[in-house]
Image: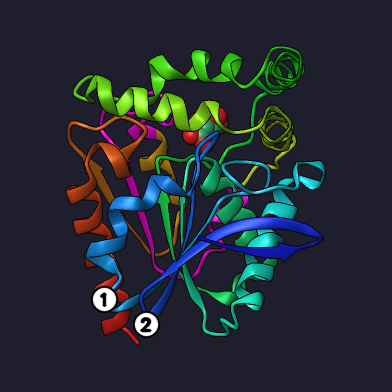
Amino acid sequence: MSYATIAGDRIRYEVHGDGTPVVFLHGFPLSGRLWRHCIEPLRKRRRLIIPDVRGLGESAGHAFATMSRYADDVADLLNALGETEPVVVVGLSMGGYIAFEFMRRHADRVRGLVLADTRANADPPQKAEERRQQAARVMAEGTRVVVDAMMPALFGPAASESLKEEWRGIMNASPPEGVAAALKAMADRPDSTPTLATIRVPTLVIVGDQDTLTPPEVSRAMHQALPDSTLIIVPGSGHMLPVEKPQEFNHHLAAFLDRLRQSD
Ligand code: MLT
C-alpha cells in the first residue's frame, strides 16, 4: 500500500503490473478494494492504478472534496507516478461521475473509458437536497446512516450474505467527514449528458441487469449518446458488478482493453 501527497493531503493508492495504464475509480462510499478481483487477471500487460478517492477508504482530504478536485487528484496522482501515457479510465457509479469530470478537464490524458453502473445526469433538485440533509445526518450520527440506507439497493438478489456484510464493514470504515463531503460533491455535480457526445475515445458501458441504483436503461441511453461505445449488460448482478460478477466483469474489461491495443 502506498500514499501520495496530493494538494497537501495523503491519498492512498495501489499500483500493480506494467503496460497500458488503467486507472480505477470506485463508487460511493466504497474504496479501492472494489477492484481487487481485477488485479491478478489484468496486471500482466497493464499498469493498474487504484486510488482510494479523497476522504473515502484510507485517503484523507475531505475538506477539498468536489467533483473537480476528485478529477484533478487523478491527474496529480498520474503526475506523481510519472505516468505520461494516456490512460484508460474505469469508473463505477460515483467513479463514473469523476470520470466525466476528468474527461472535461483532462481529455488529452484519456485513451479509453469504462462507465460501469453509472449515470450521466445530475441529481434532480429533490435528490440533491436529500443528499445535503443526509450529509448533515452523517456528520451527527456517523457513516452508518448512509450505509444502512444504501445496503438494500447495492447488491443483486444472488449476492451472498458474507459479501454484503464484508462491504457493510468496508463502507462503515470510511470517515463521516469524507462521506458527507462526497454526498455534497455528488449533489453539486453538473449534468454530464452534454459531455457524452464530446467523448471521442472508445467507451465500454457496462452494467448489472439487476442494478436498481443505475439501471440498465440508463446505460442504454448513455450508449446511444456516445459516439464510439459498446454496451454490455451482465446477467445476475446488481450495482456492485466487479465484486458480484468478477469473472464476467474482468472478461469484458480485458476484451475492451485488448481491442484498444489492437487499434493503436
Ligand atoms: C455509487 O455507487 O457511487 C452511488 O450509488 C452513486 C450515487 O449515489 O449517485
> Looking at the image, which residue is at 29% across and 79% down?
45
Q: Position of residue 105 (x, y in %)?
A: 70, 65
Q: Mark 1 points at which residue?
A: 44
Give the quarter of the figure containing the C terminus.
bottom left
Q: Which amino acid does label 2 sit on?
A: Gly
Task: Note whether 79 is above or below 1 in the view shown.
Answer: below
Q: Which residue is drawn at 39% across and 79% down?
A: 20
Please determine whether, in this image, residue 87 is positioned above or below residue 140.
below
Residue 199 is a magenta residue: yes
* Image position of 207 (left or right of 250): right
Q: Give the range drawn in magenta.
A: 193-217
Q: Quadrant of residue 114?
A: bottom left
Residue contact at pointers 1 and 2, CB within 8 angstroms: yes
The residue type indicated by label 1 comes to Lys
Tell me if residue 253 can be seen. Answer: yes
Taking the image as shown, residue 49 lies to the left or right of residue 98, namely: left
Q: Does the magenta stretch include residue 22?
A: no
Within-10-Å neighbours for mark 2: few <14, some 14–19, many 20+: few
Q: Is mark 2 within 8 Å of ligand 1?
A: no
- Quick check: 122 above or below 5? above
In this figure, which residue is indicated by the disc labeled 2? 19
Where residue 33 sits: x, y (%)?
42, 46
Residue 81: image tag: none
Q: Which residue is drawn at 54% across and 60% down?
A: 13
